[in-house]
Amino acid sequence: MKVLFIGGTGTLSTACVHRCLDLGMELFVLVRGTRDQRIPPKARVIHGDIRGAPTHVRSLLAGHTWDCVVDWVAFEEEDVLRDVEFFEGRTKKFIFISSAAVYRKPLPTPPVTESTPTGNKFWDYADKKARCEQLFHDFYQSRGFPVVIVRPGAGYAEFTLPTGIAGMGFGIADRILSGRPILVHGDGTGLWTFTFNEDFARGFVPLISLDSVVGETFHITSDEILSWIQIYDLIGSVFGGEGKYVFASSHLINKFDAELGATLLGDKSHSYIFDNSKIKRYVPDFSPRVSLRDGLCHSHDWYRHHKSEKRLDSGKDRLLDTIIAYVGSLRPVDSPRYFQRTSV
């Protein structure tokens, strides 16, 4: 099969690149060239920006038709219009990478299935993804554009760390190892699912070859469900530290930082239990194999061999310290919803 990835160096797409090549697909990757080291030599790299001048993009794609195109980087409705313009009549299948965050908040009664209503007005990113889905669906209904919608859950890789605080990465492990407290939204009992990128690839890549999936929507996640306290406890256990936790409501965190707050109010502050039966019907061999503990062990080994990648976001770190200090200054009578736990 001849496949084009628009993007291919992100957390989830990297594993999918490797799996496509392992299965013998002829894979082209259109990227800007900022992280080429993540692309295997067997992939055919096209350097360019899909959002660049249309005439230049057309020149990059000239002479090609595809069995499948996957857009990992579309976020705006104008991206949908661009994709339809460039690839209508030039691909048998087009996969739009959406997000499991599109589901309506507050979430209806679990479990979440693909038919759970969408409409997340708390987080602009999720709202835009849902609008993109609808526009693609309209093109499928009106013009037969061969779209497939895939909604990944929260993913991580060996070169990342799963966390409730967007952008912290290795900073979470660093806080644990240095004895500094971690900010946990809510009371830490909310349920969440993190999916290792190789597990996502096991469910996703077979869709590239299936004709029957055109017009369908899938979410793909791990089946392991953990509370946020269990997640942070596992990070501490694997990296060799003991977590100290400070709890604050997502609404309070949002008052300090609206961007971080949106990722909580629109996603992580809600307990997710996903029903993966649909992807398993279409891909019977799909069964997530990497537990969070095992995935964290992969990350621990990776960081041990890539010490220069232990980068910290000093701005995000200071923000957490500020919120934690504020929570610590509150008396229980003033704010009974905020409390601290200083040991695991």
Image (tube, helix red, strand yellow):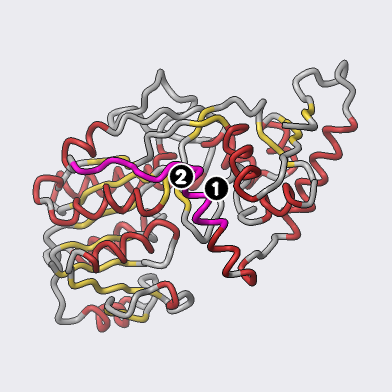
Picture residue at 37% right of the left edge, 34% below the top: 223
Q: Answer above or below: position of 297 versus 269.
A: below
- The reply to whether the C-beta atoms of the residues labelled 1 and 2 are less than 8 Å apart is yes
Q: Nearer the viewer, residue 315 or 283?
A: 283
Q: Nearer the viewer, residue 89 or 38?
A: 38
Apparent side of residue 83 relative to residue 72 in the rendered image (left or right): left
Q: Nearer the viewer, mark 1 or mark 2?
A: 1
Task: Name the residue carrying label 2.
Answer: 154
Span of residues in magenta: 285-300
Label number found at residue 102 = none
Q: Where is residue 189, by image quadrant?
A: top right
Q: CA distance from mark 1 to mark 2?
A: 8 Å
Number of other residues with Cα within 10 Å of mark 2, as a class: few under 14, some 14 to 19, many 20 or more: many
Residue 74: % across, % down: 37, 58
Amino acid beneath label 2: Ala
Number of dots carrying numbers: 2
Q: Where is residue 40, by image quadrant?
A: bottom left
Task: Name the residue carrying label 1.
Answer: 162
